[in-house]
Structure formats: C-alpha cells, structure tokens
C-alpha cells in the first residue's frame, strides 16, 4: 500500500479551509485510509487548521529533506583526517535520517 500522492493540500469549501487533507489527485487522505476513515467517523475526530497546515508542510517537504540529509551524509564532509570537529553534526544528521525513515506502527 502506498500513501496518498503528494503534494498534499488543505481542502476548501465555500472558500473556507476544512480539516480535510487532499492528495495531489484530489483524493481525501482520510478517505484513502480505512483506519483513519473509521476513527474520524466513529469518534468524530477532526484535524485543527494549525495541525492540518503542519501536516501538509511536513508531508510535502519530507522527500526533499531526506534527500538533503542523505546528500550531506554521503558528501564526505564529515570524513576528514585530523579530528572529530563535526562529530556532533554527523550524529545529528544520522539521527534525523533514522527518525525520518522510522515507520511507527
């Protein structure tokens, strides 16, 4: 199963933003996921406008950020003879990549 195609955007009805998120093809992110659809319909959950904006920004920037971190990691800029001046930065890049690539159940 793949996720809803990016970029995502907030749905608007009557020129007002809703808590629904739409994929590139106009598919509802919530409707595309049986688990989310059930949770939202049974519990009447909603996504606040600020959370919806954050989710859209995070999803749409994810691939670019992971690619940038991989490029920095693979650039060799942390592999230099003479010390560990960038050890903290190298660990920060590695930790961020691990977190971004972790799948939570």
Image (cartoon, rainbow, N blue to C red):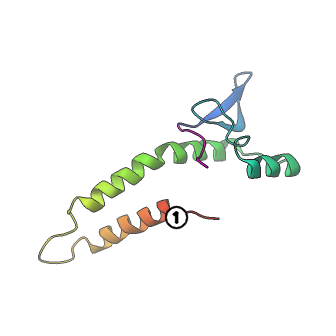
Percent of width and height locating residue 30: 72, 43
Chief SS of the magenta region? loop
Residue 45 visible, this orientation: no
Residue positioned most to the top: 14
Residue at the image position 48 percent from the left and 61 percent from the top: 101
Residue at the image position 53 percent from the left and 48 percent from the top: 58
Q: Is residue 78 above or below residue 40?
A: below
Is 20 one of the magenta-colored residues? Answer: no
Percent of width and height locating residue 25: 60, 30
Q: Is residue 40 above or below residue 75?
A: above
Residue positioned most to the left: 82
The secondary structure type at the circle numbered 1 is: loop
Residue at the image position 67 percent from the left and 31 percent from the top: 11
Percent of width and height locating residue 63: 44, 48
| Residue 22 sits in quarter | top right
- The quarter of the rendered structure image containing the C terminus is bottom right
The residue lying toward the viewer, choosing from 56 and 3, is 3
Q: Is residue 105 above or below residue 66?
A: below
Q: Which residues are magenta?
A: 1-6
Percent of width and height locating residue 97: 42, 62
Residue positioned most to the right: 42
Q: Is residue 75 above or below residue 42?
A: below
| Residue behind mark 1 | 102
Residue positioned most to the bottom: 83
């Amino acid at each position: 199963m793949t996720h809803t195609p990016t970029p995502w955007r907030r749905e608007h009805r009557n020129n007002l933003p809703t808590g629904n998120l739409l994929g590139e093809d106009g598919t509802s992110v919530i409707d595309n996921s049986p688990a989310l659809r059930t949770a939202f319909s049974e519990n009447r959950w909603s996504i606040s406008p600020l959370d919806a904006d954050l989710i859209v920004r995070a999803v749409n920037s994810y691939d670019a950020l992971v690619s940038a971190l991989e490029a920095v990691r693979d650039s060799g800029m942390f592999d230099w003879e003479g010390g560990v001046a960038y050890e903290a930065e190298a660990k920060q890049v590695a930790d961020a990549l691990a977190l971004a690539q972790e799948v939570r159940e």
